[in-house]
Amino acid sequence: MELKYLGLNTLEYDEKKCTGCGMCEIVCPLRIFRINGKKAEITAKEKCIECGACSLNCAFGAITVDSGPGCAAAVLASGLKKGSKAACNC
């Protein structure tokens, strides 16, 4: 099963600040970043779980995301328990 946010997510990317270092591509657990030429690009924003790994590891401030527990954590936690539903009822 592939999880996607169907509405809002807080991931923002400023291409002007990106140096193409590739850290976002390395640390993203869902591989939604890819280096294309000398810049990162977001390949599937709707798959972002807002974990914050990309923004925490971007030394140039090109990526911001409001990370926190929220729905993403509930969905992930429920996936670890066989037969359980997400606590956020999504």
Image (cartoon, rainbow, N blue to C red):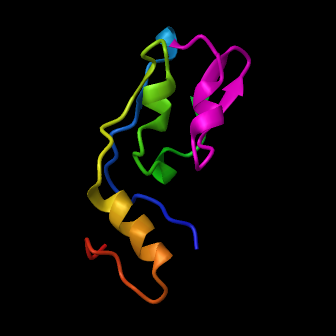
- Please identify the quarter of the rendering in which residue 37 is found: top right
- Please identify the quarter of the rendering in which residue 27 is found: top right
Image location (x, y in percent) of residue 26: 65, 34
| Span shown in magenta | 18-40
Image location (x, y in percent) of residue 65: 36, 35
Residue that appears at 69% across and 26% down: 35
Residue 27 magenta: yes
Residue most toward the front? 81
Residue that appears at 49% across and 44% down: 45
Q: Is residue 14 above or below residue 33?
A: above
Residue most toward the right? 37
Q: How many labels does the image show?
A: 0
Quadrant (top left, top right, bottom left, bottom right) of the N terminus: bottom right
Image location (x, y in percent) of residue 50: 39, 45
Q: In this view, does 16 lie above or below 71?
A: above
Residue that appears at 59% across and 42% down: 32
Front-most of residues 43 and 23: 23
